[in-house]
Amino acid sequence: MFRRRDGGFRQKLVHVTLRGALYGSWVLGLFPFTYDSWTRKLHRSKWLIGYGIVLNVGIVALILANDTESETPVRMEVFQRNPLAERINSIHDYHSLVMVALMLLRCYWKSGDIANILNELMDLQWRHFRHYPLEDCCSFDDFVLHRGLSVVLELFSMLVMELGMSPNYSPQLFLGTTGLCIMILVVLLGASHFHLAVVYIYRCVWIVNRELLRFANQLAEGETVESCKVDRLLSLYSRLLELNHRLAGNYDYQMVMVMVSFLAANVLGIYYYIIFSISLHKEMNAILLFIVPQAMIINMYDFWLAIAVCDLAERTGRKTSTILKLFNDIENLDISLERSISDFALFCSHQRFRFRHCGLFYVNYEMGFRMAITSFLYLLFLIQFDFSNL
């Protein structure tokens, strides 16, 4: 499924990261497809869907049967001091449960559409893009490595949060923590499916842009370029854009809930931090001073990666229009070639690589910054609302 690229340690690490995401998704029942190496196609498997449902229901039951909050005195002190904090924590727990259920249900319910999208993306990669050198596409490698690192850091953060804040290690704590780590891994890998598909689409668009730039340089040097080559790139570009829209439509609800979960966790973390240090007049020891900030930093890192991959694809799509403008400076173009370039430019002016989740907002750096500021304002509102209890 993954084309192995000859190269150094970096490329091998990218390949291992992609393989790890694939096999981890299979083991956790998140990738209900079998791969036919002869036809290079993914096929939906009802057995894997059933396995995923049974496994994840069992994990949720394990978490509910082994509540880790009662094993954490710091949290219990905060909840006893401030009932609102306990109520908000319960709402956040329900949100997390709904997020996991929605991610799994959408994964299985939309598995036919997802298989078609991935099959078409693999077909494009094999038929049209596999012969191009990819060593210069560093952003692809960077994002895959950052995505893998973020998953590892989130698991590390959860272990530190659960084990570092509990003075007593009991079987119930270990079982509950294990279930929570597996469930977080399910959410992170489910989100990674969308992110990795987007970054593959980005790489294909990057190749199209590089080919257009090569054509412009050839024409500037007096060489000839056939119009059919530009038409072929336009056809590939339109197929990639269609795949992008279909992919966003299948993952928008899940991605919104994941991003909201990261921001909400940071807001609640600071809120509990204020209650513990100010309301309870507790001194923050070295462990708590490390646990809370590291969890917030890792959450923001993961949140910003979700924003960055969409912004990367959007910016690369905008570069296509910029590259096409270079052809305006070239004189004596062939009529058919000029028509092909005009068609490409007209298409790019009306169709763009953008991610609009749930029809509410576009995902890019600007919106990510607004969401971060809004979460901070929610924190201020929460403090003002509950000021009398602080």
Image (cartoon, rainbow, N blue to C red):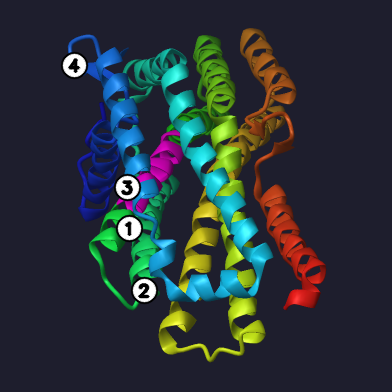
- The span picked out in magenta is 179-196
Find disc 2 in the rendering and name its residue: 166
Disc 3 crowd, CA 10 A, few/some/many (<14, 14-19, 20+): some
Find disc 4 in the rendering and name its residue: 37
Q: Nearer the viewer, mark 4 or mark 3?
A: 3
Q: Is residue 22 left or right of residue 379?
A: left
Residue in the image at 54% along x and 16% along y: 230
Q: In the displayed structure, would residue 133 be above or below residue 385?
A: above
Mark 3 is on which residue type? Ile
Look at the numbered disc 2 and give the secondary structure of its residue.
loop
In the picture, the disc for residue 252 is none
Residue 135 image position (x, y, % from top left): 33, 44
State which tag comes first along the sequence, 4 or 3: 4
Magenta: main secondary structure:
helix
Q: Look at the image and say whether residue 316 sits in the magenta stretch.
A: no
Residue 108 image position (x, y, % from top left): 41, 21
